[in-house]
Amino acid sequence: MKSAMHRMPMLATALITLIFVISACAAPVPTPAPQVIEKPVIQTQVVEKQVLVTQVVEKQVVVTATPAPVPTKAAQPVNLRFTIWSSNEKHLAMLNSFAQAYKTTHPNVSVQFDTIPFADYATKLAVQLAGSNPPDAGWMPESLAVPFLEARALADLGPRIKKDAEYDFADLSQPAMSLYTKGDSVLGVPFSTSPHFVLYNIDLFEKAGIDTPDKLYARDEWTWANLAKAAKTIKDKTGVNGFQSVSAGIYKEYLTQSLAEFTRAWGGDIWDAEGKTCLLNKPESVAALQWYHDMVFKDKSAVPPGEEVDFFSGGAAIRPGYLSEIARLEKAPFKWAVIRLPKGPAGWSPVIGQSSIVAFKAGRNADAAADFVAFVTNKDNSKTMAQFFPSIRKSVLESPDFLKANPLVPAGAMKDHVVPSIASGRLLPTHANFEKIRLAITPIFDGMWKADANVQASMDKACEAMKPLLNK
């Protein structure tokens, strides 16, 4: 049986047909007509000669029937489901603190954060949205945004956030919002525009007796070629892997992120800006992939396929990553630092990953979901999230406080390496058929991760497999 991921092209149909609007209208209770009750009243009077006279006086008493009191409509309990891919305890603590703060003003609303591993996120999210208990809101990576947008699976947040003066929609960087603004509609709000940068183990550089990346950068020698030389020296002298790919995922779910880092630095890419032409088999891209292939199989300095290594416990010397991962280094058993990606033959090519918060049309609590998304992405909460996730709010990025937002990263490193990477970085590749493309080329790359593989021939096959899925 085919996996749910293979049904991604059916996402739009599945979601649209499974969105139900249920409404119930109660008929008004008729009010009874007024009733007139005739009630005799006995009055006694004393008249002359002390003769008692008894007189019957007819008195009308009008009784109007009062309808039964209608109870004030209490806010119904709302349970929002919010999907994420992080299981980091600090991320979860922060998100749950937002949910608790929201509940103080919306006591009927509870929020449940459901973690789906990133490798399974596309598949499981699509299945849940087409199921009987769809999530109301969640995180959306840039790689999946286009298919979900084209499937019209995302709810419009515009009516909630654009006219709210306190929210200050104009404070959001409009270039960073470009993927999610369609006319007057706002279909998501990026909460993280995170540049790729390099984490490195200072202890391993010192043990190998070589200059650390910051010293190379100061001499304008921080290049991918010199990174490879450092990685080989570290492996030769310490026995520890010199290099690990971004988020340790080049052989798994982070293949395209790694490809973007390497190929763009050489002047290539995965596909062109229009998403119509494969560029993996172009000379620049092939040269970049040959460089990495040599690190793995000739230098034996990069983590090879099938080997599990934990950079955060000292298993590798150099690893590209994201700001959100740095929390894992809080208790690292070694000295470490961060620096921007190296330069390649085509110069400095910073890469940006973008994650957004969206509300799903299939959810059953549309208004509450939109309101909660607005709350999480407001100015105050954006400042809080900035310790892990670089904001797109200009008021946050331009504030001196942003440089101190992450207590683990020195303000100087934020200023010199993180902020410039955000300012001039290019977004990771996106495409309407992103998942299908990734599935089509992954087996080809699996075959290329061998010592005797021909990189050019492999990339020719990758482009051939990709061709039917481009320009659609």
Image (cartoon, grey):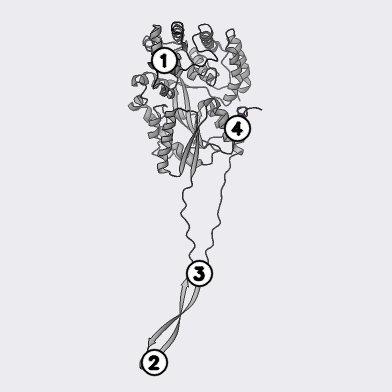
Q: Quadrant of the N terminus?
A: top right
Q: In the rendering, which numbered label is found on residue 51? A: 2
Q: Quadrant of residue 6?
A: top right
Label 4 to label 2: alpha-carbon separation: 99 Å
Q: Residues within 10 Å of mark 2 (few under 14, many from 20)?
A: few
Q: Return the disc, 1 or 3, that comes first in the chain's sequence.
A: 3
The x, y position of residue 214, in whole percent, is 37, 12
Q: Are marks 4 and 2 in contact (CB under 8 Å)?
A: no
Label 3 to label 2: alpha-carbon separation: 41 Å
Q: Residues within 10 Å of mark 3 (few under 14, many from 20)?
A: few
Q: In what element is the residue under mark 1?
A: strand
> Disc 4 vs disc 2: which is toward the camera?
2
Whether residue 400 can be seen here:
yes
> Disc 3 vs disc 2: which is toward the camera?
2
**Residue 7 magenta-highlighted:** yes
Label 1 to label 3: alpha-carbon separation: 86 Å
Q: Return the disc, 1 or 2, that comes first in the chain's sequence.
A: 2
Please tell me which residue lies in front, 425 or 43.
43
Give the answer, above or below, for where 320 lies relative to 61: above
Label 1 to label 2: alpha-carbon separation: 119 Å
Q: Quadrant of the C terminus?
A: top right
The x, y position of residue 424, in whole percent, is 43, 20
**Residue 359 magenta-highlighted:** no
Q: Quadrant of residue 280?
A: top right
Determine which residue is flagged by label 4: 11
Q: Are marks 4 and 3 in contact (CB under 8 Å)?
A: no
- For the record, the magenta segment spans 1-11
> Disc 4 vs disc 1: which is toward the camera?
1
Determine which residue is flagged by label 1: 200
Give the answer, above or below, for where 85 lies relative to 264: below
